[in-house]
Amino acid sequence: MKTIKAEKLTREAFWEFGTYVNITEPEGNSLGDFFNDKGLFSVSGDMPVAFSPLLLHGADEMVVTMAEYHNTTGEGIIAMDDDIVIHVAPPTGAPVPGSTRAFIVPKGTMVILKTGVWHFGGFPLHKDAGHVLIVLPERIYKTDCCVVEYAKENHIKIEL
C-alpha cells in the first residue's frame, strides 16, 4: 500500500485542486462585517445550491479506498467542528490514485474543489467523528457523480 503525507493547506500547494477560505477568520476586503464573495465555484444551469451535512468517522488508519468526481460542478467542503484530512487527485478521464495528495483542512475552513477533481469524504483529525458541510447543486450526487472503488493494490495510507 502506498503511503502519502498529509500536507498543510496552502494556496501554492492546493491551487491545482481548487481554493479555500477561512470562514471563522476571514481576511481581505469587506463591507463592514460582511466579507463578500470569498469563495466561488461554478455550477451548470440554474440549479439551486444545496447545503448537506456529512458526518466523517475516525479510523485507526486513514486509508483511501475510493474517490469520486463531478463533471459539471465544483464542490465546497466546510470543516465544521474539527480539523479534517481530505484527499484529492487531478481531474482526469480515469482514476489516478498514484497522483493522490492529502491536505489538512483547519476547522472553520471551506475548500472549494474545481470541477473534475477526484476526492471523497475525509477523516476527522482529533475526534471520533467530525461534521462537514457539503455545498453542491441540488441532487448532483444522483445526476453527476462518478464514484470509483480502488483495487486493493491502489489503496493509499495517509500519515500526518
Image: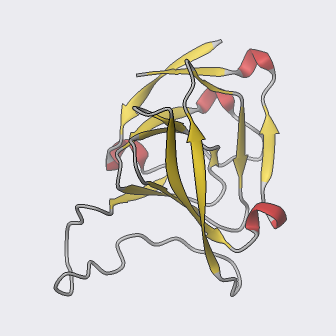
Q: Position of residue 121 (x, y in %)?
A: 61, 44
User: What residue is at 76 percent from the left and 61 percent from the top?
Assistant: 141
Name the quadrant containing residue 60.
top right
Identity of the residue drawn at 71% across and 84% down: 45
Camera-nearest residue between 117 and 92: 117
Instruction: Report the residue at 71% width, 58% height from top.
Output: 70
Q: Is residue 77 above or below residue 29?
A: above
36 lies left or right of 59: left
Q: Is residue 156 left or right of residue 93?
A: left
- Residue 119: percent from left, percent from top: 63, 44
**Which is more toward the observer, 64 or 81?**
81
Quarter of the rendering containing residue 59: top right
Tally the marks.
Answer: 0
Q: Residue at x 83, y 66 (%)?
A: 143
Quadrant location of the C terminus? top left
From the viewer's perspective, is residue 125 above or below residue 20?
A: above
Residue 88, can we see it?
no
Instruction: State how the image is colored.
Output: secondary structure
Residue at the left extreme of this rendering: 32
> Looking at this view, is 119 or 123 the one in front?
123
Image coordinates for residue 159, horizontal then vertical, percent:
46, 19
